[in-house]
Image (tube, rainbow, N blue to C red):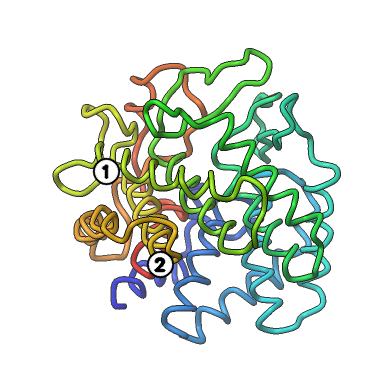
Amino acid sequence: MHLIEKVTDRIVYGNDSDWNMNIHHFDWVPGVGLYGIWKAYEKTKKPEYIEFLKNWADKHLIEAYDKKTINSTIPCLTILELYLLTGNAEYIKVCEDIAEYIVYQAPVTVDGGLEHTVTEEVPGFGNQMWADTLFMACLFVCKIGKVINRQDYVDFAIKQLKLHHQYLWNEEEGLFYHGWNGNDRNHMSGIFWGRANAWIIYSTVQILEETGDFEGRAELISRIEKHIKSLGKWQRDNGMFGTILNDPLAYDETSASSGIAAGIKKAVANGYVDSRLEVIADKCRKSLPNYIDSAGNVLGVSTGTPILPTAERYKEIRQCPTLYGQALMILALAQ
């Protein structure tokens, strides 16, 4: 519990202006950080965490309409939790509006998957599906569908889950690619990026947790077990996972390791996989405290990583504390 509070307090009491730790705007980096604070609240019940989240929502809620993108949807997941806690009608109104946009207006690829869209001023990623999308948008769409009894939203989230599994999964390796290019019909550099696999395993289990039976559910659960076994094969001796999973020369990456550990723990807790696989998560979690410094910063986290052209470029991505690194650490420690 002490470590959860230490990592969370670094966000709540920080005053950062750099992209990687600035929580005061409506986008994916702050959004993942908010979700970490929410999970810390669930575990600790500290009222100051809820006060921080409510103050954030009251200040930034209107920004949800500034740039509607896949990546900037994730703050709504925590706002939805705040609605369930407080009953604030403004919270659910924004959530309903953003969900309606994602399901019925957001651009989709030629394969039907949500196209990866971002708020940053960068060239677009036309007809590309990225692993990140399941966490950044589909968790929220599935959750709000259950909350407001919109089965079309739940069905949409399930469809997206299936499509991302279909196009990003490598059956032979038992791992997920970073992305898929619908125009070129390939996985671009074909990298098994660590954090992509973290986003997918956590999101897959969470969406399955939120939904009832549906066609293809058993296949997804079976794939989770194969995925975890493959992850175990590439786990380092120190319990961590690389920023490229199957490259021993790639550096240990803390956010990927944390997200993977959290996803495995959730899969075991839900009975989706053999409980003996939990040893993989436990081995990782024993190492995670070594990556938290005295100020609560989570170290060894790669900065924002687009789909890069070569393995060497992935291995050159700089490491720094980030809000998503803090949050994924919280998920791993709290699960």
Which image quarter: residue 159? Answer: top right
Picture coordinates of residue 75, whole percent (x, y): 64, 59
Nearest the viewer among 28 and 122 is 28
Picture mark count: 2
Label 2: which secondary element = helix
Residue placed furthest toward the top:
184
Give whichever of discs 2 and 1 has the lower sequence position: 1
Nearest the viewer among 64 and 152 is 152
- Residue denoted by label 1: 232
Nearest the viewer among 320 and 158 is 158
Is 136 displayed left or right of 229 in the figure? right
Picture coordinates of residue 176, whole percent (x, y): 46, 34
Q: Residue at x 66, y 76 (%)?
A: 82
When the figure is inspected, residue 155 is found, relative to residue 39, above or below; the finding is above
Label 1: which secondary element = helix
Which numbered circle lies on residue 174? none
The amino acid marked with disc number 2 is Ala
Residue placed furthest toward the left:
237
The N terminus lies in quadrant: bottom left
Which numbered circle lies on residue 269? 2
Which image quarter: residue 150? Answer: bottom right
